[in-house]
Image (cartoon, rainbow, N blue to C red):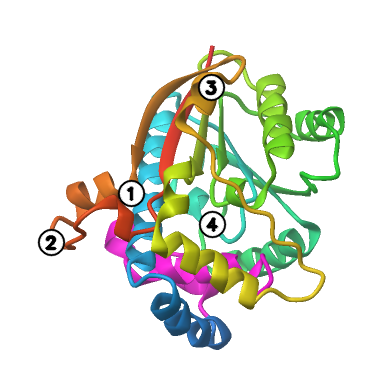
Amino acid sequence: MKIHETAFVVSTYRSYHEDISKDGYAKLWNNTATNALIPDILKSVSEHEAILHSLRNRFFYERMNSFFQQNEGGTLVNFGAGFSMYQFSFDDHVSTIEIDKKDIVDYKKEKVDAWIKDNKLPHRDIQYTAIDFNQNSVDTMVSSLLSILKKEPTFILIEGVVFFLDRQTTNKLFEVFRQLQKPGDLVGVVTYLPEVENTEVYKRLLHYFDSHNDTGDSFMHQTIPDEYFYKINGYQVKENTDEFEMVKIHVPTHKIKNREEILNETMYILEKS
């Protein structure tokens, strides 16, 4: 499985639970190849993955929507945007900068432009830029993004990405965020905490990726301790929760006994100080 294929899988997960994810557009990405992959993933890794990814989407959708309503607009800067569709559920006074690898950015722009033309999606102010987080310097990324960032305040989202980075690149990205943002701006980020490494479900996830990894498609993975986010220069933690807690709020009938039986991600909202 190539890393970018996870973007199709996650969008399909969101389409399974539109009432929870609040993503009424995810189904546009559904395709027969991904549909064929998913049953084996759910069986090999965890049957709860679709609902958990939908809850993660719900968390960030609600926080971003509230932020942009309070500020009467702004810009969503989506690092590693994949096939997320948040902007189409926000008011049209919200601009979006979509950042990902070139093949994903080009493919997404082509599809989104066609769907807007066919009235399957509402028109939105979206700019796309291809950036390799591992290869590009802080100065290069900041300069590139400042040249297209026209509307403030900003909400930076980095969702489903940190897991595939090393710590050095993660540190570099937070320095990019710090230089891009102003006080009161927000960052939304999601990670696995190190405790998950001892669970059987996490070991199954790593085994699945390793055993389905295409030659030449590197698979870096990391977990990050909670204290990391409390020590980021220029930011303070405004909110954090995990998917286990989100289940109890939004789908209490979906019985999960404890955090150890799921791939439990933790979501953070950081505020620029």
Disc 3, disc 1: CB below 8 Å?
A: no
The kind of secondary structure element at disc 1 is: helix
Q: Position of residue 54 (x, y in %)?
A: 37, 59
Q: Are marks 2 and 4 in contact (CB under 8 Å)?
A: no
Q: Quarter-wise, where is residue 44 in the image?
A: bottom left
Residue 130: image location, x then y, percent: 79, 51
Dot 4 or dot 1: first in sequence order is: 4
Of the residues shown, which amino acid type is indicated by label 4? Answer: Ser
Please tell me which of labels 4 and 3 falls first in the chain.
Answer: 4
The structure residue drawn at horizontal position 37% and vertical position 67%, both measured from the top left corner, is: 50
List the residue tagged with mark 3. 185
Residue at image mark 2: 253
Distance of label 4 from label 1 (alpha carbons): 18 Å
Query: How much space separates mark 1 and mark 2, taking CA atoms?
Result: 15 Å
Q: Position of residue 21 (x, y in %)?
A: 35, 57
Nearer the observer, 95 or 15: 15
Q: Is residue 9 within the magenta segment? A: yes
- Can residue 91 be seen in the rendering of this structure? no
Looking at numbered disc 2 in the image, what kind of residue is underneath it?
A: Thr
Task: From the image, tell me which residue sits under label 4.
Answer: 84
Alpha-carbon span between mark 2 and mark 4: 27 Å
Look at 74% across and 31% down and name the residue there. 172
Q: Residue at x 48, y 51 (%)?
A: 86
Is residue 117 one of those drawn in magenta? no
